[in-house]
Image (cartoon, rainbow, N blue to C red):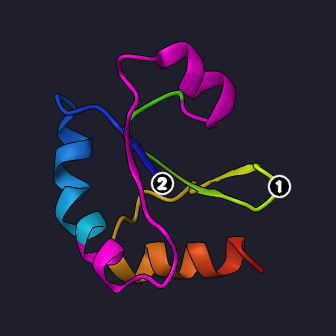
């Protein structure tokens, strides 16, 4: 899941890579507009800035992607590791 803000340049910059990742992924992938519900995304989705990529595990835990490298391969590697 990516938590984004449409006005955020960093969110805009990663949109194409994230969409490519979503098309290639074998897990469900979601985008969530977080700028309108900041209290929720801060409390529930480890999000203090945009964009934030999280893997939501089966138990509901959100695991935050900490890298600034936002390529398809980097996100794929993160998701694979987070779901082990």
Q: Nearer the viewer, residue 15 or 22?
A: 22
Secondary structure of the residue carrying numbered label 2 = loop
Horizontally, residue 34 falls left or right of residue 61, namely: left
Residue 52 locus on image (x, y percent): 46, 44
Q: In this view, does 7 lie above or below 64?
A: above
Residue 71 locus on image (x, y percent): 33, 73
Q: Residue 49 carries which label?
A: none
Residue 45: which quarter of the image? top right
Q: Does the magenta stretch include residue 36?
A: yes
Query: Is the residue marked by circle 1 packed among few (<14), some (14-19), or many (20+) residues within 10 Å?
Result: few
Horizontally, residue 60 falls left or right of residue 41, namely: right
Residue 31 locus on image (x, y percent): 36, 49
Q: Which residue is drawn at 73% across and 60% down?
A: 57
Q: Which mark is residue 1?
A: 2
Q: Residue at x 63, y 36 (%)?
A: 46
Q: Name the residue under label 1.
A: 59
Q: Which of 84 and 65 is in front in this view?
A: 84
Secondary structure of the residue carrying numbered label 1 = loop
Q: Is residue 73 magenta?
A: no
Q: Residue at x 39, y 65 (%)?
A: 69
Q: Nearer the viewer, residue 75 or 21?
A: 21
Horizontally, residue 39 falls left or right of residue 38, namely: right
Residue 19 locus on image (x, y percent): 25, 67
The segment highlighted magenta reads 20-47
């Amino acid at each position: 899941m990516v938590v984004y803000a449409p006005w955020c340049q960093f969110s805009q910059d990663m949109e194409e890579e994230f969409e490519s990742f979503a098309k290639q992924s074998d897990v469900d992938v979601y985008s969530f507009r977080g700028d309108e519900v900041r209290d929720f995304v801060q409390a529930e989705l480890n999000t203090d800035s945009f964009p934030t990529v999280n893997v939501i595990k089966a138990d509901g835990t959100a695991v935050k992607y900490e890298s600034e490298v936002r390529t398809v391969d980097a996100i794929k590697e993160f998701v694979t590791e987070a779901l082990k």
